[in-house]
Image (cartoon, rainbow, N blue to C red):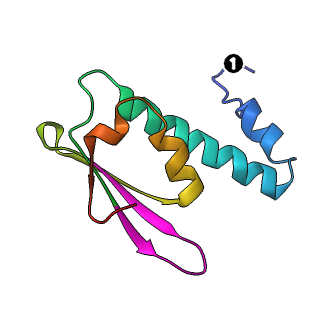
Amino acid sequence: MPGSYRIASRSRSYEAQLHPALRGARRVQRILDSLRLELAGEGGCGRVRVRRILKEPVEVFRLELERPELSYQRVTLLDRDCLEELLELDGVRERLVPAEPL
């Protein structure tokens, strides 16, 4: 029968069969990769600010990326391990405006 048919993404159908913990870990990795690309992108990002919002039971940090020239703001919540992994990227720590010492 003629027409256009949409084929479901193969990665989504594959991930649906994975263990939930593994799916969550892959999602976290995709978010970190996206943040790395944005932080290391051309022209850099405008302002990067980190603030701790929870101490217990797990430390949670709020990462804010702001680019006023594009009217763009991105807010992401990260735990300590993810934040440290992200800050290993060259030049990120220099652009960081911490609200409190990490």
Relative image position of residue 49 (x, y in whole percent)? 28, 54
Residue labelled with disc 1: 2
Q: Magenta part mainly helix, strand or loop? A: strand
Where disc 1 sits, the SS reads loop
Relative image position of residue 75 (x, y in whole percent)? 36, 56
12 left or right of 62? right
The residue lying toward the viewer, choosing from 22 and 17, is 22
The N terminus - image quarter: top right
User: Does the segment drawn in magenta span residue 52?
Assistant: yes
User: Does the segment drawn in magenta span residue 57?
Assistant: yes
Relative image position of residue 77 (x, y in whole percent)? 46, 61
85 left or right of 46? right
Q: Residue at x 75, y 50 (%)?
A: 23
Residue 9 vertical position relative to residue 31 in the rendered view, above or below? above
Residue 33 vertical position relative to residue 81 in the rendered view, above or below? above
Which residue appears farthest toward the left when viewing the image? Answer: 69
Magenta-tinted stretch? 51-65
